[in-house]
Image: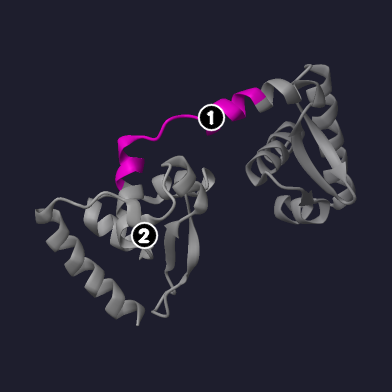
Amino acid sequence: MKASKLQAAVEAILFASGEPVELDKIAQVLEIEPDVCEQVILNLSAKLDEMNSGICVLKLDNMYQLSSRTEYAEVIRDVLELRKNTPLSPAAFEVLAVIAYNQPVTKSFIEQIRGVDCSGVIATLCQKKLIEEKGRLDLPGRPLIYGTTPDFLRCFSISSLDELPDLPQKETDSVEEQNEENNQVLE
C-alpha cells in the first residue's frame, strides 16, 4: 500500500474508533511493522499541523487517537450543548410515550407498536437521559429492556408515572392487552 493510502487508512481508523487505538493493532490490521506504522502516524500528525487542522493526533502511552485541538474546546462545547437541547421529534415523543406507559419494554415491543425501526430514537432518548436500560429479559438473545429515568419525570414536571394522563379508552384496551403479554414474558 502506498504511503498516502496508509496515512489515509490510519486517519480513517483513528476517526472511526473515537477511542485510543493501540499502535500494534493498527500495524497488524494494515499488515505493516509497528515502527513503519508509527512513522505513518507521525506523518499524519505533521500533515494535520501543517494544514492548521482543527484536529490533531494524540499519543497516549502506546495508543493514538484523533482529537480536537484545545483552542477549539469552547466552540465545540457550545455546539454540543445546542445539540443536547434540541427539541424532541414527534417520533421521539411517541417512543417515550410507549416506554412511559408500558415499561419495562424491549425495543422489539416498541417497534411492534410503532411499526418502524426505533434504534436511533432509543439511542437519542438514552443520550438525553430520558430513558435507560433497566436490564435484560431471560429469553433467547437476552433483549434489553428500557424504562424512564428521574430526568424524564423532571422534564415533564411530574413526581411519578402515576401522574401521566390516562390514555383514551380505545387505545387503553390495546395497551392493557400488550401489558398483560409483557408481564407474562417478564415472569
* Side (left or right) of 14 relative to 101: right
Query: What is the C-alpha distance between the residues marked 2 and 1?
Result: 24 Å
Question: Residue 127 at what x, y percent from top left?
Answer: 53, 45
Snapshot quadrant of residue 183: bottom left
Q: Residue at x 79, y 26 (%)?
A: 69
User: Which stretch is magenta?
Assistant: 78-94
User: Which residue in the structure is indicated by mark 1?
Assistant: 83
Give the image location of residue 22, x and y in percent.
80, 53
Q: Is residue 130 left or right of residue 6?
A: left
**Mark 2 or mark 1, earlier in chain:** 1
Residue at 71% from the left image edge and 54% from the top image edge: 29
Is residue 97 highlighted in magenta?
Answer: no
Q: Is residue 84 magenta?
A: yes
Task: For the C terminus, give its image quadrant.
Answer: bottom left
Q: Nearer the viewer, residue 143 or 56?
A: 143
Q: State the predominant SS element of the stretch in magenta.
A: helix
Which SS class for mark 2? helix
**Please, what is the three-letter code of the amino acid marked with disc 2?**
Lys
Q: Residue shown at 42%/30% (left/top)?
A: 87
Q: Position of residue 31 (x, y in %)?
A: 74, 53
Q: Quadrant of the N terminus?
A: top right
Q: Is residue 185 above or below residue 114?
A: below
Q: Please give the count of numbered marks on the rendered protein.
A: 2
- Which numbered marker is on residue 107? 2
User: Residue flagged by tag 1: what amino acid is it?
Assistant: Arg
